[in-house]
Amino acid sequence: MLRTLHIQNYVLIDQLDIDFERGFSVITGETGAGKSILLGAIGLLLGQRADMKMLKAGAQRCVIEARFDLSQYDFANYFTSHDLDFDGQECIIRRELTATGKSRAFINDTPTSLSELKELGDMLIDVHSQHQNLLLNKEDFQLQVLDAVASNTQERATYSTLYKEYVGACEDYEQARKQAEKDKSELDYMAYQLEQLEEAKLTEGEEEELEQELSMLEHAEEIKSTLFQCHMLLDNDETGLVSRLRETQRQLEAIAPVFPAAQQLAERLESCYIEVHDITNEVANDVDNVDYDPERLSFVSERISTLHNLKQKFHAEDEEQLIAIRDDLRKRLAVIENSDEHLREMQVHIDQVKKSLGKAAQVLTSMRTKAARTVEEEMKLRLVPLGMPNVQFQVNLASDHPFSPNGQDKVTFLFTANKNVSLQPLSQIASGGETARLMLALKAMISGMVKLPTIIFDEIDTGVSGHIAEKMAEIMKEMGDTQQRQVISITHLPQIAAMGSCHYRVYKTDDDTGTTSHIVRLSTEERVEELARMLSGSTLTQAAIDNAKALLKVK
């Protein structure tokens, strides 16, 4: 539950420190005194988006911090799963805003995201404001009520997982079907493209080799003539380089006995001779192999032209890319050929998931049907004391709708507060005062089933007064006292304010620096005066004071 609240430099608040107690507490104050500001600050702690206008004029930094006592609640799993420090007793939430536009959030001094802060905040405090009464008319809210009573969190999680799988499978099937139709319309063209690439018998690096061969074929006569001349220079019987090397070697060997250094020179010439002799043989072979071949020249030219045309047609840079395109076409055509079978397999999977989804939806329907009877009985019991002796309340659950994220159920709360009046949807007949009482009854019912530490009601008593207001106060007090939770009501009604175990008053002051909002806890004497003011207005009368004492049961 909320133990302390610290607010600094927020809108009209300079600094505020307030302690809260377990049970039922009330907050009162004149219109415009700052009650909404207080709720706005709590909203920031619960993960609402920050507006720099919230920063008090002239301040550089705004801080809102709350300390919660969680010793009687099981929050250990949350803190462990989010890797947050937790001693099992206390949780501190802090929100900071700066004049530069920065916003930071902390849980137990660990920086956190707004989504994480909101997730925790939703488990700590339920703030019920006046506009939330309108939720009562919405189908989603009514379904949430049934689910809360049914305690079907695990079953809804199972259904949600299957629903996502089902939707995903249907989307995949539809995408595959459309692609198959598109591919089939292009089948002939794709087959023609593949045939062209298959007939080309592509190999990597072929074009480069062909271009080299083409260059040689185009200069064959020049190459052959040059090679012949080189061979003559190397292998002429009398003047060729090979004959001269051999003759030089013999002469050096002849003088070696009288000039030993000549032997080493002769041996070195032997190596030169061997290398030149090999070169001479290769040149001779090349002379024989190089011939002008017009047919081969034509073939190479045409082959290069074919490769060039294919690259242009398929927007490829080389044979490697053409081969990749060819292989991709093979795969795509194989997929098209097997598309019908693939679609059948996908449909089988969809049918299997749909069957499981239907069973999961039936489980939800069964649990909700049982919860609906509980809601009907509980609401009648709770609404009769709230001035509706002839109330009829019925939950209409239709379960034949298409699958949705929440199941196949559509829920409608039917209501009438009068005899001989047929049941109608809440949105069509409930008045403002009736809606307030209905919402309080629902909250009281649900709070007994959901372990929520703190509930704040912001003027839920709108549209009621007198005896009915007193009964509403009794319900809120019961929620705080017997259900071991903290209930705080912001109210304008003295009958409700008198029921609080603790009473806080919000007021504002004006001075030369501006307007400032404050909140204080009232003593018994101060409560008498506050209630008397709520009963009679700014001018206190003895009758109002006596009435206030009677409400508080003090002398």
Image: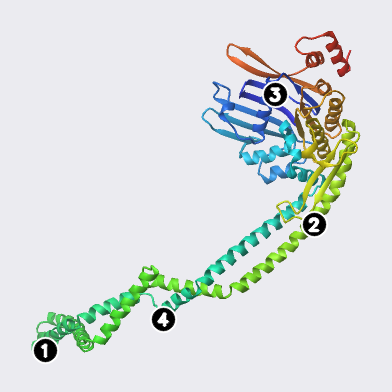
- Circle 1 SS class: loop
Q: CA distance from mark 2 to mark 3?
A: 46 Å
Counting other residues with Cα less than 10 Å from the Cα at mark 2, is it few (<14), some (14-19), or many (20 or more)?
some
User: Is residue 457 visible from the viewing direction of this image?
Assistant: yes
Q: Which residue is the site of mark 1?
A: 236
- Circle 3 SS class: helix
Q: Name the residue type under label 1.
A: Asn
> Image quarter for residue 206?
bottom left
Q: Nearer the viewer, residue 287 or 520?
A: 520
Counting other residues with Cα less than 10 Å from the Cα at mark 1, is it few (<14), some (14-19), or many (20 or more)?
few
Q: Determine contact: label 1, label 2, CB under 8 Å.
A: no
| For marks 3 and 4 on the same chain, the one whose residue lies earlier in the sequence | 3
Circle 3 or circle 1, nearest the eye: 3
- Circle 4 SS class: helix
Q: Which residue is the site of mark 4?
A: 199
User: Is residue 318 visible from the viewing direction of this image?
Assistant: no
User: In the image, is residue 421 above or below residue 307?
Assistant: above
Taking the spot 62% from the left edge, 64% from the top edge, the residue there is 173
